Amino acid sequence: MRRLLPILVIILAASCSTFTLSEGPEWIRMRPVRSGVVVFVGSGTGGNEAEARSAAYLDLLKQMSMDLGYEVTGLYYRELLSTDGIEELGTRITDRYSAPGNGRIHYFALAETPEERYYSSRSQEYAEALERTGTIAGYLDSALEAYRNNRDTESLAYILEALDESLSGPVTDPGHTPGNLLGRAMEILGNIELSLRDPGPGTEVTVRMERAKGFFHPPVVSGMIRASYTMVDGEGNETGASVSAMTGDNGRVRFVKVNPYTVRRGSIGFSVDVPEDLLASIAAKAGEGFIEDFMSLLDEKTVRFDYADSGRLDSSSTIISVTSYDQDGMMMPGSEAAAAFSAFLSSVYAQPFTIVQGIGDDEGEVLSYLRREYPGMEDYVILRIGIVDSAEGGGVSYARSESRLSAYSGQSALPYIQQDSYAAGRGESEEEAGYDSLRRGAEIAAGMFLSHL
């Protein structure tokens, strides 16, 4: 009995030992990376080594199933357990380790699969998810780099690209969900501030963009700003328009009107310029309401500039004449063209110019008439518009008119503006078509004249 006591103590000590990962080979603690092969390490425990080995092999196959995108456990478990390999994939168990602890056996198995054969076995859906995740990661890396260089709107655009990609299908990184990416986009947008400085004549104003975060607010470099304003179309109807501008290294850009059809009194909204097609794509993929908060924040960041643009010509020292001619070249007493010309200028809130009917068979006679009747004016503007052709077809009458608009300074013999245009009109009668062509021609001439106002 005394001789058996030491043996019993040894058995009890072994059965009470605790297994720790600090024991054994390095690969059980950190999965190795090896060129040309895909490595997985499975682990399991059991009441004996056979049970522990089975559990470790099962763990291996579960990992592979998640990575491949389809279930392989039922396909290969029996083969792997009996042969230590999977012939179809070229998988082999190349290393093993087991150790007792807490009354059980802990088993580790290292499996290697040729990389080319392994990746060719991935499901199409999972392969696409992996590619999508990689694309998103690339966008986010670019966003971070742009942010570090104070290019906040560029960073925002990259994050929105990542968001759009994440809405295209599954991803494998839980941090790349649409909700997370939308939150990151709103954080970037929330820190961008726009302010207006140094208002000048008409629509001129300086817009500053900065990152309102931290003690110092750095300027946003190459920041994209959208200026939204009201203009008129070719018939004098108001419509919305916009133009993009980019800040310099100082985070500022000077806005100057470049569209002559901009209304002369109104308001310009300056906002962070986000690609509209990208927002539309995100909204379409995500469904109703997903980007409402983002769009609301975008609106909150908009600053407005109210302006009044008097233009280049002073209405008090400018006289405009409109003379209409019929198809025979005879002056027409009607005021159809003059009314259309005046209405178009009024539609852009231009100054109230004096518009009269000119008298004369040619431009020289009309100019002489104006200088005689309205002496001392700084500018004389002459619009001569006439019907040059007409036709009928299908019960509808058509007419074509041609016009010339000229502008003279004071007593100058040469015009500093001379522009020609034409228009077509239609109506139930030849007379109605003629008047329609005169109206349209006057509107076109007035629209062209805006670039000089």
Image: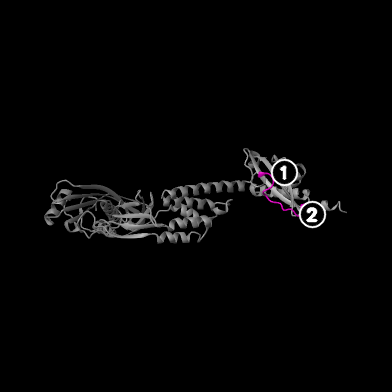
Where is residue 309? Give x, y as percent.
26, 57
Which SS does the magenta portion mostly show?
Answer: loop
Label 1 sits on residue: 96
Q: Is residue 95 left or right of residue 420?
A: right
Closer-to-camera residue (206/120): 206
Q: Give the class, few, some or many, for how many residues have Cα within 10 Å of label 1's Cα (few <14, many ≥20).
A: some
2 or 1: mark nearer the eye: 2
The N terminus, quarter of image: bottom right
Where is residue 269? Give x, y as percent.
35, 58
Determine whether label 2 and label 1 are within 8 Å by CB: no
Q: Is residue 240 left or right of residue 449?
A: right
Residue type beneath disc 1: Arg
Label 2 sits on residue: 12
Q: Is residue 107 left or right of residue 445?
A: right
Rendered residue at 77%/48% (across/down) = 49
Q: Quadrant of residue 83?
A: top right
Q: Which residues are magenta?
A: 13-26
Earlier along the polypeptide chain: callout 2 or callout 1?
2
Is residue 446 something one can see in this rendering?
Answer: yes
Where is residue 331? Give x, y as percent.
20, 53
Closer-to-camera residue (414/57): 57
Closer-to-camera residue (374/316): 316
**Would you say residue 20 sits in the magenta stretch?**
yes
Closer-to-camera residue (91/205): 91
- Residue farthest to the top, as pictured: 36
Residue type beneath disc 2: Leu
Q: Secondary structure at mark 1?
A: strand
Q: Is residue 200 left or right of residue 276?
A: left
**Would you say residue 257 sits in the magenta stretch?**
no
